[in-house]
Every structure is written in structure tokens, then in C-alpha cells.
Image (tube, rainbow, N blue to C red):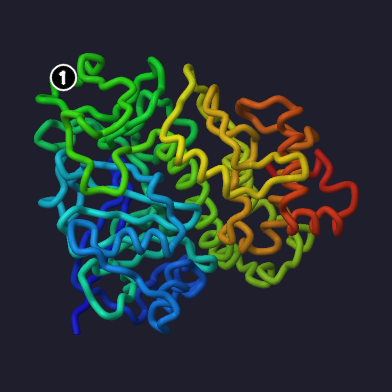
Amino acid sequence: MMTRQTFFVFTSGLLAALTLLPGPVAGQFSNSDEYSMIDYASPATKNPIARLHDAVASGETTLDYKPGERGYLDSLLAALDIDTTSQMMVFSPTSLQHKLISPERPRAIFFNDTTFIGFVQNSSIVEVTTIDDDKGLVFYTFDNVPQDTKLFERADQTCLVCHDTQGTMGGGVPMLMALSSVYSSRNVPLKNYSGIGNVTDTTPLVDRWGGWYVTGRHGLQAHLGNILLATPDDLDNLDDFRIWNLETMAGSKFMDPSPYPENTSDIVALLVLEHQVTVQNQITYIKFKAPAVLKRREMLHELEAQSWAELSEPAQRALTRMLDRLVQQLVFIDAVDYQSSISGNPDYVEQFMARGPVDGEGRSLREFDLRNRLMRYPLSYLVYTTDFNSLPVYVMDYVYDQMDAYLSGRIDFDGRSQYTLAERQAALEIFTATHPGFRSYLAARGPAGMNTAQLGSLR
């Protein structure tokens, strides 16, 4: 029996899905240490979609189908605890569903800390990407047609044609891509503004959101959202085509938002998404690459280490760079400054910050700044996710120590921080108060971690 297979990519600001015939299952990752060492082809069971799948199959949870243009979408979002105010809309036609996607009928994307949902008008498929604690990024389809039982179907090897960091099973790892390209009014890409990498916290706003609709206020800070050009020659005069501070898509010249849950494509949600994709890609990279690197260096026995100190110095040197990169992303090193305050859908801001947790003084790592930078405190809210906290214990030992050393002021990183030492120390206080795993680490470690010389010798 043939089943549909889907792969997803954030390309030109788009969660795209290609519906393909099934690929091979047995031994599908046999040429890659990265995939085989974590048994990526086996069932993914430690993620929100697997849990919802089981709940629906057992009858514990029921999803409601509403006839019309959205079908199961609203019920699916509610079951996954994804707020509709996270809605972002993109019009890049980069999938086999391209005939359904246009500036008049953009794709809507919704997300929370672990899961991304893609919805296309008049499509029978809802696209799903989620983070599995063991396997990192995994991909599913959900048939948006009325049935007695709704089950998710995991995607196959075909996902990684675009999702592998080195191409078609080239020894890379799964990843999400957040890119930015300007399109013509005929929805043809004219210029890529994100280069060969992703849009991240360090990408200037002027180069972001090509292919997206963007609502919210951003002052006179230019971006590439809401732009459709007649010819490539118009690229030389982008300021003539910018739509500034668009509050809502309702009544806009672009499209009718009434078929969607919200009438916004929120600028704050876009900023959060780009940060989140960057960090989650690095976490997945570590989960795949760390064991593969040690295997290639004939250090497999090091995988059983219960602390960073138990690793040999060669093993530590092999892993330090990828771990440092994660820590620097978590503490917003080299993130861009905003030149004006940014504001979006207040309901999105409220529900995001309400997810806490908060310390005894009411402070939270989920507090926005949005005046000069994204977050109020220099430590990502993603430290609370099971994706982060399921990293190998020797990785967590090193990452915790680095975070403590940086936030307390014992060390600095090359690169620029937007935060004062007092703000760093406040983030450390919040993290200590709200994260039991970190408190346990500090208690077990004692008052001193790695000294500065030891940390420097590994870089």
C-alpha cells in the first residue's frame, strides 16, 4: 500500500512540503554514521506528535472537523497547545502544492516551543514538523479530510533531500531552513538575501522576511516582507516598494485573511521563530554529530562518560566548538540591535510570556524586550525544552558550566553582547531559581566549575 511521504523546509520564509512516493525504509541511512548511530529510521516516540497520535488512536483525545476551509486545523492546534496568534503567512510557492500557494492564498505557519504546523487553503494535507528528544527534527503528514480516526504519518528518507545539511544523505544532519528571498508579482524568486545559511539572530533586519507577509510596527527599520516586484530591475529601488508598519492583513491589497484563524502575520512571532530554529538546529546537530565524531576518532567508549571531566582531552577538543556555538546562541552573542521599538500582536506577546516559569521576583526568561533587542534577559527560553535537556550528560555538564561562567561574568566570548553584566547575572539568577536540573548541577559541582584557563585551553 502506497503512503504519502512529506518533507519540510523553511525556504524563503516558508514551511514547504513535498508529497512524494515512499522511499526505502530498511537501511535507509546506512551510509551515514550520524543517522545510524541514533537509529533515526526507527519509530520516533518522544515528541508531541507521537503522544497525540497515541491519544487519538486510543480514543483519549478527539479532534473535531469543521466543514469549510480549515477542517481539523483549529482542533489540531488546540490539541498541540499551539496558539493561533503565532500565525505567520508566506507566499513562496516552493512545494509540490505550489498551485495552491500564491500571494492571494499564502501558507500559514503556527508554532510553539516544539512543533511547527503548515496550513494551505484547499489542501488535504496539514504539514507537521516536531522535535523528538532522541532524534531531533522529525516530519509528519496529517490528512485534513473528515475521517473517524485521525493519525499522523511520519515522513521518510525523501525529507532529507532538502533537510540534510550536506544534501542527499551526505553525512550531514536534519535541519530546518529559514531563508529570505524577494519574489516577483508572478511569485518567481528574484534574489536570495540569506546567502548559503539561515536567517538567525545575527541577520540584519533589512535582509529578513523576503517571501513573508509581515504585520506589526517596526518604525523606519526596513525589511523585505510584503514586497512583490514587477521585474528584477526593481531590486535596485526596494524602498519604493516597501510596505511600512502594516497592522493587519485585513483590508490590505495583498490577500483576504478571513479563511485563516488570525488576520496577522506577526513580526514578533517571526523574530522568535528565527531564534528558535537556530538553536534547535544546533541541538540536533550536537545529538547527531557528537557520537559520530567520537566514533570516527575511535573513541566510542567516551559516549558512556557521565561528566565532561571523564572525557579525554582529545575527545573534549573534538566537541568543544559545537558546544560553544550552542552556548553562544543561547546567550544571544552578536544578535542584531533594533533601531526602533518593535511591536506585534499583543495577544501573541501575552500568551508567549505567560508560559513562564517565573522566579520568586516574578522574572522570566520569556520576557520580551523589543526596544533594542528580542529578549529582556540574555538566556534563551529554550533551556526549558526537553530537546535541550535530553542532550547527553557530558554535553550538559560542559554547557551548564559555560553558561554559568559567562552569565556570572567569569568568562566572555569573542563577539558582541547586547547585555550588561548585571543583566547577565539576573539571567543566571532566574535560571537557577526556575530550572531544577541546573540547580542540581550546581549543588553537585560545588562552588567552582572549570577555571578560566581550562576553558580557554579547549577553544
Q: Indicate whether 94 appears above or below 144.
A: above
Q: Position of residue 119 (x, y in %)?
A: 26, 54
Residue at point 21%, 14% (across, down): 240
Check the picture and name the quadrant holding the C terminus.
top right
On the image, the x and y values in percent for residue 356 come to 62, 48
Indicate whether 190 appears above or below 241.
Answer: below
Which residue, given by chain and number where applicable, does mark 1 sit on?
Answer: 234
Q: Residue furthest right?
A: 447
**Location of residue 216 with respect to 44 vertically, above or below:** above
Image point (64%, 30%), residue name: 414
Please provide percent x and percent y for residue 71.
24, 63
Closest to the observer: 252 or 221? 252
Q: Is residue 334 visible?
A: yes
Q: Quadrant of residue 452?
A: top right
Pick whichever, 56 or 330, lies toward us: 56
Relative depth, front residue between 453 and 158: 158
Q: Quadrant of the N terminus?
A: bottom left
User: What residue is at 34 percent from the left and 35 percent from the top?
Assistant: 195
Q: Secondary structure at mark 1?
A: helix
